[in-house]
Structures are given as C-alpha cells and as structure tokens.
Amino acid sequence: MWTPHEVEANGLTIHYLRTGGANKPALVLAHGSTDNGNCWGRVASALADRYDVIAPDARGHGRSSAPDGDYSNVAMATDLAALIGALGLDRPFVGGHSMGANTALTLVAHWPEIARAAILEDPVFRLEPPAPPESNPWRDRLIASHAKWQVQTHAEVVAAGRAGSPRWHEDEFEAWADAKKHVNAAYVHATGSSVPFDWRALLAKVRVPTLLVTSDSAPVDNGIVSPEAAEVARGLCPTLEVARLPGAGHNIRREQFGPFVTAVAAFLDRHA
C-alpha cells in the first residue's frame, strides 16, 4: 500500500512512508506521542486513491533520528518543514494527531505559505494552565510506560493495547505496538520540559483553512479539546472549522474511523 523511504532534513535522518501517485495532492500526516508514521495506515489506505499520503516518524520515534535535547513543538515543526522542502512538495495538506496536531499547527503558524490547509485531530488545546516542567505527571507516566514497553514482548504490548482500547479496530494494534517498542528514551525524558505549547497565540496566526476534529464527549472520555476550548479556538482563527464526532475519545480516528475519514475527506476535497 505504501513504501518506506528516508531523507536527510534539518540535520536528521527522517524515515517516512508514502503511498505515492502522480498528479495527486500531497497530504503529510504527523503522528501522536509514542506512535509513528505507520499508525496512519488505515487512513492512508482510505485516502490513497485521491491523495499522495506521506507519514514521517517524528524525531525520537520509529526509525528517524533521536537527537538529545530539543523535542519542542517548534523543533518538530521545523523537521516537518524541512521534510516538505526536501521532498519538493508544493503546498501540501498537513495534518496530525495530538502531538502531531500541535506540530501541524506550529508549522502553519510559523510557515504560513508552506501548506494549503491543516487538519488537527484532538490537539492539546487545554484551557487550564500547563503543569510546570518540574511537576509533570504526564511525563512521569510516559517514562513508566516506556520502561514497561522495553521489557514486554511485541505480543504483550498488543495484548495491553487491546485491553486498554476495546473500541479500536483490530488492524490498529500491530502498528501501535511496534511504535511503542521503537520510542527512543531521548524523547521520553526530554518531552514536557520544553517551552509550553501556546495554542492560542499560534491559532491567531493561522491563515489557511483548518479543520479541528474533536470528540463530542471530551474531556469526559479521554478526549482533550472540550466544547469550551473548541469555541475559544474558533474565535481565535476565522479559517477554523470544527467537527465534533460522537463516540470517540482522544484517538478519534481509531474509535470512529468512518466518520473521521468522511469529515477529513470532505474537507480535503473542498480545498484540493
């Protein structure tokens, strides 16, 4: 369905998967924390007939370089901009989930001419202040999870994924577990210690059409973007559309795949 490649960009070796296809608009998808590009496989399959889907592994993830130091949203967005330049893509669509949505938003805010539109799947739009770097329970949980993944077999990670996410399609778990086994410790220990993600300031800079995909039950069902946060986002960005999908948590495409692809495909087709 898609093939692996590597490119040197921003001083890193970036591994990516690509569906290819001549004369198709490019769609670059950034994955969430501890995932990798292959976690977009089902979405890529659904869109490959109309779009050239490109899914890189972020720094510290999958088979891309894992430098020490900076794992901020700006660093990852700079990597993504360098990848787009290295591949010679002409104003691709960009999208992302969670951390990857933060990356995509940072990209279109800082490089306003680089993309024609953006898709944000449950980015980290929280109304409450972020936890201080020295007291970050999310990072502490990530460090503990990473230590556990390193000693578990692939089958054990798959089983844990099935138990923890019973609403996911079976086809999600192999890629998800492989991603967990390939997260680099450099990312795990650096994340959460960088500059806080100022999503409000970034949204105010966005000029391209942008689709915010959220759960209609957030934050009750592990989703991040609450209805109140979505309204704040809409007020900050005149080009923002909001799609609230029922029956999903944070992993919207994994829990409501059909509605997610329908919303995304409609948005892409309008702006292609």
Image (cartoon, helix red, strand yellow):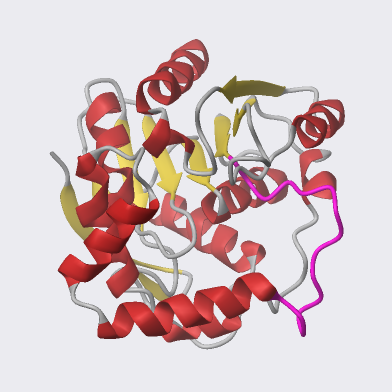
- Snapshot quadrant of residue 161: bottom left
Q: Is residue 191 visible?
A: no
- Residue at figure coordinates x 44%, y 52% from the top left: 31
State how many labels appear.
0
Could you tell me which quadrant the C terminus lies in? Answer: top left
Task: Inspect the magenta stretch and tell me whether residue 80 lies in it.
Answer: no
Residue 77 place in picture, x, y as percent:
58, 58
Query: Residue 17 or 212: which is nearer the viewer?
Result: 212
Query: Residue 60 or 257: which is nearer the viewer?
Result: 257
| Magenta residues, dominant SS class | loop
The part of the chain drawn in magenta is 122-136
Residue 159 place in picture, x, y as percent:
23, 60
- Above or below, 139 against 74 in this view is below
Query: Residue 86 or 121: which is nearer the viewer?
Result: 121
- Snapshot quadrant of residue 54: top left
Task: Inspect the magenta stretch and tell me whether residue 128 lies in it.
Answer: yes
Could you tell me which quadrant the N terminus lies in? Answer: top left
Left/right placement of residue 257 relative to residue 178 reads right
